[in-house]
């Protein structure tokens, strides 16, 4: 949390302290929790253990204090109640300004606030008592659509808030040096829940980190989740599984060629090889997250077999499957296409789409190799899973914040720092699966948002234009411009 002083305020808001003169403090009696009536020519104000009587043209009858400023009908002077000791709480100055989606209101205090932070929400209505006399709240410019009833009571300032059709939420927390009490208020669009099938529903919910973040998600207590797509072929997620209840974009791929980046296991068959990041692994409706333990083997021209590293998991002999620069200085690479060695070249080399490469120390291949020789790559998960799809970074692991892209093979941090829609797979400790896309944010913020909602494990799938959640053929997640075709997706079917 940044200190309050780090937030900019308009000059008007910075200088806004209610400074009412004796002639300008007349407020309706109801503002102070008092009732008003006329009785035998006198004005009577009662409530909160107080009875005040004023006789027009004569003065105060109760109490007999000639120095008190006079009322005007049902309006009572604030200064009179101050003088009588009506208020039993300290007085606070007030500042306010827009804050993101909502309003930030600050009470400037003379002593630190002793209470703990508060956090609450309500559908259309909220009532909040600030334990200070804060006349400045009468001048607050509340967010559009929010109606506020302010009462200055002996025990503090009561805010009665109403916003038709909105979800009202507030956070109240103290700050020190100097002492302040901060109120953040939001009037948000209502949350949404729509049934899709027994045990499966579409939801739009708010998470708070502390700013509100809207998540679009499909929640499933059961069903079938299947990776769909084909390497080299890009399509909108909805077109990869047209009969699915919901489809979420899958893992990463090389945009020019559509080559998948990372592990992809389809019905027990390896479609794409690991890239050193965390993967979603599952059988049935039991899900796991982790860096895949993968055994890769190259078979040589005479049937020889040698274990090799794969992509970011380097070894003396390493297989490379993702287009781009492969191999290191002092190595050679055998470029392979169609299970035939196309060329043996000094490293590093550019690996073209549709090929793979074997790197090895210069002049020391694992077995004799020349162009035209057969060379094949095989691999399997240990332990095996029927389905797997690599993405990353990891967001939440066993109920703890786990976002640390430096532990995975992410060389360029900029995409993970961009504020864009984020797609993720998560599940609760009870086993409810979430396929979700957030409104624009960063992966680190999304991790905290999912933790606040009770996620037990969570994995980012992708972000930006690739982040898409389709529900019964309709795009339900936020997007800018046209949705981007992808290579893989996760399709959810009813049980």
Image (cartoon, rainbow, N blue to C red):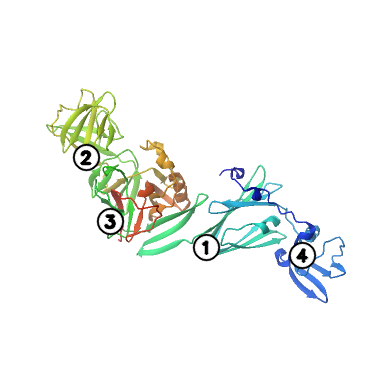
Q: What whole-number distance in Å separates the C-alpha atoms at marks 2 and 1?
A: 53 Å
Q: Earlier in the sequence, mark 1 or mark 4?
A: 4
Q: Which of 226 and 58 is in front in this view?
A: 58
Residue 166 circle label? 1
Residue placed under numbered mark 4 in the picture: 76
Q: Which of 95 and 130 is in front in this view?
A: 95
User: Could one spot residue 239 in this view of the protein?
Assistant: yes
Q: Earlier in the sequence, mark 1 or mark 3?
A: 1
Crowding near the residue tagged with mark 1, few <14, some 14–19, many ≥20 C-alpha atoms within 10 Å: some
Q: Earlier in the sequence, mark 2 or mark 4?
A: 4
User: Residue 428: percent from the left, percent from the top?
Assistant: 41, 53
Left of 337 or right of it: where is 429? right
Residue placed under numbered mark 3 in the picture: 239
Q: Is residue 379 above or below residue 19?
A: above
Q: What is the quadrant of residue 177 in the picture?
A: top right
Q: In this view, does 454 lie above or below 308?
A: below
Q: What whole-number distance in Å separates the C-alpha atoms at marks 1 and 4?
A: 34 Å
Q: In this view, does 228 lie above or below 63?
A: above
Crowding near the residue tagged with mark 3, few <14, some 14–19, many ≥20 C-alpha atoms within 10 Å: some
User: Residue 355: percent from the left, percent from the top?
Assistant: 21, 37
Left of 482 or right of it: where is 340? left
- Determine whether the residue tagged by mark 3 lies in a helix, strand or loop: helix
């Amino acid at each position: 949390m940044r200190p309050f002083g780090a937030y900019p305020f308009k000059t008007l808001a910075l200088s806004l302290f209610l400074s009412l003169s004796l002639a300008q403090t007349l407020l309706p009696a109801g503002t102070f929790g008092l009732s008003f009536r006329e009785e035998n020519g006198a004005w009577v104000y009662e409530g909160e253990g107080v009875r005040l009587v004023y006789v027009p043209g004569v003065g105060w009858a109760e109490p007999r204090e000639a120095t008190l400023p006079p009322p005007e009908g049902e309006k009572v002077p604030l200064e009179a109640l101050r003088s009588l000791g009506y208020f039993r709480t300290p007085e606070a100055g007030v500042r306010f300004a827009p804050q993101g989606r909502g309003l930030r209101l600050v009470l400037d205090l003379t002593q630190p606030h002793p209470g703990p932070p508060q956090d609450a929400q309500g559908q259309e209505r909220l009532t909040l008592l600030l334990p200070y006399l804060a006349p400045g709240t009468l001048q607050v410019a509340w967010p559009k659509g929010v109606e506020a009833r302010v009462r200055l009571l002996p025990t503090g300032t009561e805010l009665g808030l109403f916003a038709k059709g909105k979800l009202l939420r507030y956070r109240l927390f103290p700050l020190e040096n100097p002492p302040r009490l901060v109120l953040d208020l939001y009037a948000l669009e209502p949350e949404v829940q729509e049934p899709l099938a027994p045990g499966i529903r579409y939801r739009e919910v708010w998470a708070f980190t502390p700013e509100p973040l809207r998540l679009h998600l499909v929640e499933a207590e059961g069903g079938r989740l299947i990776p769909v797509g084909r390497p080299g072929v890009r399509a909108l997620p909805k077109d990869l599984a047209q009969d699915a209840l919901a489809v979420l974009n899958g893992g990463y791929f090389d945009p020019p060629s559509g080559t998948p980046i990372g592990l992809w296991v389809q019905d027990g068959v390896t479609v794409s090889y690991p890239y050193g990041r965390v993967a979603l692994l599952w059988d049935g409706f039991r899900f796991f997250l982790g860096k895949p333990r993968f055994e890769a083997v190259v078979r040589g021209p005479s049937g020889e077999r040698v274990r090799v590293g794969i992509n970011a998991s380097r070894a003396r002999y390493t297989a490379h499957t993702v287009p781009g620069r492969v191999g290191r200085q002092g190595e050679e690479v055998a470029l392979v296409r169609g299970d035939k060695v196309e060329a043996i070249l000094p490293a590093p080399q550019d690996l073209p789409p549709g090929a793979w490469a074997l790197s090895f120390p210069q002049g020391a291949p694992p077995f004799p190799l020349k162009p035209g020789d057969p060379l094949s790559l095989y691999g399997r998960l240990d332990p095996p899973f029927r389905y797997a799809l690599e993405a990353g970074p990891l967001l939440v692991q066993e109920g703890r914040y786990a976002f640390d892209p430096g532990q995975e093979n992410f060389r360029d941090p900029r995409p993970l720092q961009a504020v864009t829609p984020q797609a993720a797979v998560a599940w609760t400790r009870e086993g409810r699966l979430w396929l979700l896309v957030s409104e624009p944010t960063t992966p680190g913020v999304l991790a905290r948002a999912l933790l606040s909602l009770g996620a037990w494990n969570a994995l980012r799938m992708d972000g930006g234009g690739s982040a898409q959640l389709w529900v019964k053929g309709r795009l339900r997640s936020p997007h800018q411009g046209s949705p981007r075709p992808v290579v893989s997706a996760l399709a959810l079917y009813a049980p």
